[in-house]
Every structure is written in C-alpha cells, then in structure tokens.
Image (cartoon, helix red, strand yellow):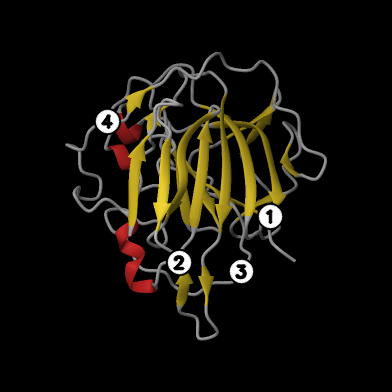
Amino acid sequence: MLRYVTGPVLTGLMVLLATGPAAASDFGRSVDDEWEIHDPDRPQPSVVDPGSAPEVPRPVPSDAMVLFDGSDASAWEHRNGDEVSWKIEDGYMEVVPGTGDIVTTDAFGDVQLYVEWATPETPAGDGQARANSGIFLMDRYEVQLLDSYNNPTYPDGQAAAVYGQHPPLVNASRAPGDWQSFDIIWTRPRFDDNGAPIEPARVTVFHNGVLVHHEVELTGPTAHQSRPPYEFHPDRLPIRLQDHRGEADKIRFRSIWVRNLEKH
C-alpha cells in the first residue's frame, strides 16, 4: 500500500513510500479510492507558474532516438500503416482531426520520453472539449494532453494526469499557444511466465519542469470511466499520440525524443 506525505522543499513535491513490490491483488490500492473515477467534486490541483515558455526546443541527449524534430515524421505511422497525414509546417506537427491516432514504427519498454507540445492559441470549448489529446505509453497507458489553463475539468483528466487514475500533484500548465513539455520516466509492468502481472507499471512526470507524478503505480491500462486490470502484453510496444477528433483538439508537437532505459 502506498502513502504520500507532503514536503516543504519543492511546491507540489511528494515523497512516495512503498512497502515493497505489489502483488497483482494490490495494484488497485495505488489509486486514492476516496474519489470516484472522473469525480467532478474532487479538489482541483493547485496552480503553479512554471515560468516562461522556451523559444527553442530543449537540446537532445546524444543517446536519444529522435522521434520528431519539427519536420520529419518518418518515425510515425497511422495505426493502419499509412504515412502520417497530420499537418507538418513551420517546425511543428499538428493533429488533423479525423485522420486517426499515430504510433511509432519502433516499439519501446522502459523509457525516458520527452515531448514538447502546445494547445491552440485561441481556445475553443471547455473541460475535456478543449485541446484534448494523449500520449499512450506502450499503446495503452495514457498521460493526458489538455488545455488546463483556466479550464477546470475532473482532476484525473486534466493536463498531465495519468488518465482516470492519478491527477497531477499541481497544475503547471502554460497559457494556450505557449510551448509546454512533458518529461516522462516510464517503467513498464512485468508479467510472470504464465502472463500474470507481478509488478505494476510506474511513471514519473515533469510538466514544464515541475514534478507532477513521482513513481506512481498504475492499476492497469487506460480506459474511460473504468479501471480495467492488467492483461499480458509484449515487453515492447509502440508509443501512440491521440487524435481526439474534435475541431478544438489541434494539438501541436515540435520535439519528441526517447531514451531506452531497459536493462540488458
């Protein structure tokens, strides 16, 4: 079972204390069961100003694989194998609603994933209908993308939430149109020889340089209004970017890279 305690050193920082590797029957305990899934009455995370948006992308580490550099989307494809049909211009790639999700042509397990993204400069809609997308680790575990700047929604669905499971510790969103970043440290779930889960997936996320998740455990794959259990899957799977299909959901991406953290 997990316990969280607040600390005075960094706003929004929490220290995760665990009693040891969770058995499959304990996975659900990593979520605060006081609140229903997508509960609109759940307290909103406090707002933290992350500082000004960077004018240029963050430098790429020498051992990273570049997945998008502002112009080349060859590391991606639509789920049917077609070339990416999202708009690419002026150093960014923009979701074209209705064209479908895109996935990496390579598969990944434990990774550091870095993504720079921006919501439309002129907001439209509210709540989940304002600039909605998602980053799916291993094609099934989602870190939410959303315009959460002065845009309340259920906390486990706002920007940087582990969708349907963990709200971010704080809301570190920048204004619409400003470039933002996610730095995600992902540890995949482990399964035994019979396909039963023996270790849950864990994720640490920095939103615009602010820690919003620290080694939180996932109860299973992402779903809407439910928390399905783990099902066996390969150790490596593609990363997916979501086309949420709304006209207000034209998220832009300008830099995406990944570092392999798998132990050999």
* Mark nearer the N terminus (2 vs 3): 2
Label for residue 235? 3
Image point 42% across, 61% down: which residue?
221
Judging by the rendered image, the residue that carries numbered circle 4 is 44
Residue at mark 3 to residue at mark 1: CA–CA distance: 12 Å
Judging by the rendered image, the residue that carries numbered circle 1 is 261
- Residue 151 at x, y percent in the picture: 32, 24
Splitting the image into 4 quarters, where does residue 79 fall? Answer: bottom right
Q: Residues within 10 Å of mark 4 (few under 14, many from 20)?
A: some
Residue at mark 4 to residue at mark 2: CA–CA distance: 30 Å
* Mark nearer the N terminus (4 vs 2): 2
Q: In this view of the protein, can residue 251 be seen by the observer?
A: yes
Image point 49% across, 34% down: which residue?
211
- Badge 4 amino acid: Gln
- Badge 3 amino acid: Asp
* Mark nearer the N terminus (3 vs 4): 4
